């Protein structure tokens, strides 16, 4: 999801592939701006419609007079305004894909809600759902008010490459220049600033959602809301700016869609939160691990499938254009890694724990997806299977390890997002386009930043407001204690 | 009148109900209950940690019937609920002092 300044490469690739599909020459791609002298050329824009039929859209004679000085390549915005319908169509398709991908990432919040509900007890379901509702609402607004411009500061750094202050996104433009002004050329001019914003905004809330699962069933609602807001609004854009905003990591470090910037960030913030908060009552009694059962495996499974579906937008949209080759490659690597992660976790649990554990298989699929997220565009399909399979294996042992360490994570978020986020980032240095040492430095830096920021945030909130509900409330359930409302009022649930 | 309380395996409910209906018994009360006897519980596993389930799900049927039907009914329940394996359940029979049908105020055998 690194946005390159003025890079029309994806657009050109998209156009080239389009031309190949149509099996006709695409004269519109001849660059008239680069012509050395005055030329008059026949321009034929060819588009492929939904049925795959070739339609000649426009044939026009374009006179281009070479300017005094050598002209630069046109930006996608200039290309859009050049009046060529093919250029406009490509811009429109790119922008539409970003918006659709944003909608798919939004769906992941339904996935997180269902997964977290299913893997926790029925007496806390209203609380779990409430937190997830709050996070997406808060996340979008905080990102609009502060985060977006702090993560993508352009040249407005306070500490160059490390920190920028956020500002609210622009409110609007005059009627006449609305479309012109909406086309951003700050990082990647391939789509409108609105498409850009909404796609990034959907990502931002994910970090808090990851924490939500790990601290479920015992955290005070108000304290969680405060901590989540601080982390999403201020911390996430800082480490995000290091890489995607053009900061100190952006030169050589590769994190395509956020194995580190989104997932490891959330996972390590969650780890710090759990360390400050402590385990659920009754989880570790007399040196023994007493499992606290999730109340609905169907809900957890639905959540995983929703997340998998959303991941096509999360990774696919991170191509930042509708480039046919890259988008479809990313779909393939994403799906294969998720599948491999699911199988690997299922068989690992079958061998190590003697039974095929469904909740581990669900964690494994997500672990595979998290693992491939950093290199979904640069790792080939079969290495992607390997990356996913290793993720799925790691996640089982990681869940067991954290349980032994009495770090109580009801949904396995620290293992899935934190540990496998690290692994996925490092894997780009092994199987993808990255350099191993740089990948390690990057993922460690981001994880450490998230961990320390979260540790301080939750520590301070614990000192001032308290972090845990009372033992009585934890026993009775947070649904009654925090909300005075049960998730399942019509029948006696197994509490 | 006698009250028959039968604790049976859940999947035997249909067979027991049909066996009682064949005897002309027109009503019963059924509850989902949990418990254990000699069968004890069993071990399950969740995310790598084993735990013991002591109380197993059972069905409790309560029927109140006239004295002369009690023996046949008990026999029918035992026959229908039997699998021969541990955990088939138990039947308890106790005397009932009085029964009243709320709608009609009928009492005794006519009420059950």
Image (cartoon, grey):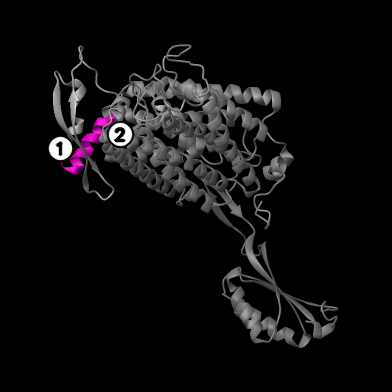
Q: Quadrant of residue A457?
A: top right
The answer for which chain carries disc 2 is: A
Q: Position of residue A187 (x, y in %)?
A: 37, 22
Magenta range? A10-25
Q: Position of residue A332 (x, y in %)?
A: 31, 42
The answer for which chain carries disc 1 is: A
Q: Quadrant of residue A2?
A: top left
- Residue placed at 42% from the left, 44% from the top? A308
Q: Quadrant of residue A113?
A: top right
Question: Does any portion of residue A380 appear in the rendered image?
Answer: no
Left-right relation of A97 to A15: right
Residue A25's label in the rendered image is 1
Residue A88's label in the rendered image is 2
Vertical comparison of B23 with A224: above or below: below
Magenta stretch prevailing secondary structure: helix
Disc 2 packing (10 Å; few <14; some 14–19; many ≥20):
some
Element type where label 2 sits in the image: helix
- Mark 1–mark 2 Cα distance, whole angstroms, equals 18 Å
- Residue placed at 36% from the left, 28% from the top? A426
Residue A11 painted magenta? yes
Vertical comparison of A434 with A292: above or below: above
Foreground of the two, A409 or B50: A409
Q: Position of residue A117 (x, y in %)?
A: 57, 46
Question: Is label 1 in contact with label 2 (beta carbons under 8 Å)?
Answer: no
Mark count: 2
Left-right relation of A179 to A467: left
Element type where label 1 sits in the image: loop
Q: Position of residue A368 (x, y in %)?
A: 39, 40
Foreground of the two, A336 or B5: A336
């Amino acid at each position: 999801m690194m946005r390159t300044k003025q890079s029309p490469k994806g657009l050109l690739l998209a156009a080239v592939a389009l031309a190949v599909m149509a099996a006709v020459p695409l004269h519109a791609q001849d660059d008239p701006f680069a012509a050395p002298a005055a030329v008059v050329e026949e321009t034929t824009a060819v588009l492929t419609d939904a049925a795959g039929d070739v339609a000649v859209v426009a044939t026009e004679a374009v006179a281009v007079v070479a300017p005094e000085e050598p002209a630069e390549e046109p930006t996608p915005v200039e290309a859009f305004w050049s009046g060529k319908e093919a250029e406009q169509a490509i811009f429109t398709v790119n922008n539409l894909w970003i918006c659709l991908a944003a909608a798919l990432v939004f769906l992941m919040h339904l996935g997180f809600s269902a997964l977290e509900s299913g893997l926790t007890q029925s007496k806390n379901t209203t609380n779990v759902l409430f937190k997830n509702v709050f996070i997406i609402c808060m996340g979008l607004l905080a990102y609009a008010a502060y985060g977006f411009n702090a993560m993508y500061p352009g040249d407005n750094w306070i500490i160059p490459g490390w920190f920028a202050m956020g500002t609210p996104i622009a409110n609007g433009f005059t009627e006449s220049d609305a479309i012109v002004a909406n086309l951003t050329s700050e990082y990647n001019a391939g789509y409108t600033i609105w498409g850009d914003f909404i796609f990034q905004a959907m990502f931002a809330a994910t970090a808090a959602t990851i924490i939500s699962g790990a601290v479920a069933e015992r955290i005070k609602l108000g304290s969680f809301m405060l901590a989540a807001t601080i982390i999403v609004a201020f911390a996430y854009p800082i480490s995000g700016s290091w890489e995607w905003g053009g900061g100190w990591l952006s030169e050589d470090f590769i994190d395509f869609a956020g194995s580190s910037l989104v997932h490891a960030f959330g996972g390590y913030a969650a780890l710090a939160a759990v360390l400050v908060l402590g385990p659920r009552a009754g989880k570790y009694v007399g040196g023994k691990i007493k499992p606290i059962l999730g109340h609905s495996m169907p809900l957890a499974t639905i959540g995983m499938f929703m997340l998998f579906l959303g991941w096509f937008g999360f990774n696919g949209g991170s191509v930042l254009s509708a480039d046919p080759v890259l988008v479809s490659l990313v779909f393939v690597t994403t799906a294969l890694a998720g599948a491999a992660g699911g199988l690997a976790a299922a068989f690992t649990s079958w061998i190590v724990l003697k039974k095929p554990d469904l909740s581990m298989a669900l964690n494994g699929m997500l672990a595979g997806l998290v693992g491939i997220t950093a290199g979904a565009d640069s790792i080939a399909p079969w290495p992607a299977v390997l990356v996913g399979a290793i993720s799925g294996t790691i996640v089982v042992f990681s869940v067991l390890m954290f349980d032994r360490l009495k770090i109580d994570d009801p949904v396995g978020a620290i293992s899935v997002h934190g540990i496998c986020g690290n692994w996925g980032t490092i894997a780009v240095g092994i199987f993808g386009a990255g350099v191993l040492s740089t990948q390690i430095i990057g993922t460690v830096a981001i994880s450490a930043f998230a961990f320390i920021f979260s540790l301080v945030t939750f520590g301070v909130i614990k000192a001032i407001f308290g972090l845990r509900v009372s033992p009585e409330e934890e026993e009775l359930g947070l649904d009654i204690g925090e909300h005075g409302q049960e998730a399942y009022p019509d029948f006696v649930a197994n509490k | 009148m006698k009250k028959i309380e039968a604790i049976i395996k859940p999947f035997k409910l249909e067979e027991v109900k049909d066996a009682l209906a064949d005897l002309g018994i027109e009503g019963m009360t059924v509850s989902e209950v949990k418990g254990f006897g000699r069968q004890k519980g069993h071990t399950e596993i969740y995310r790598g940690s084993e735990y013991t389930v002591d109380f197993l799900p059972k069905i409790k049927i309560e029927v109140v019937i006239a004295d002369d039907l009690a023996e046949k009914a008990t026999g029918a329940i035992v026959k229908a609920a039997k699998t021969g394996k541990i955990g088939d359940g138990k039947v308890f029979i106790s005397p009932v002092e009085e029964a009243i049908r709320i709608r009609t105020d009928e009492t005794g055998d006519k009420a059950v």
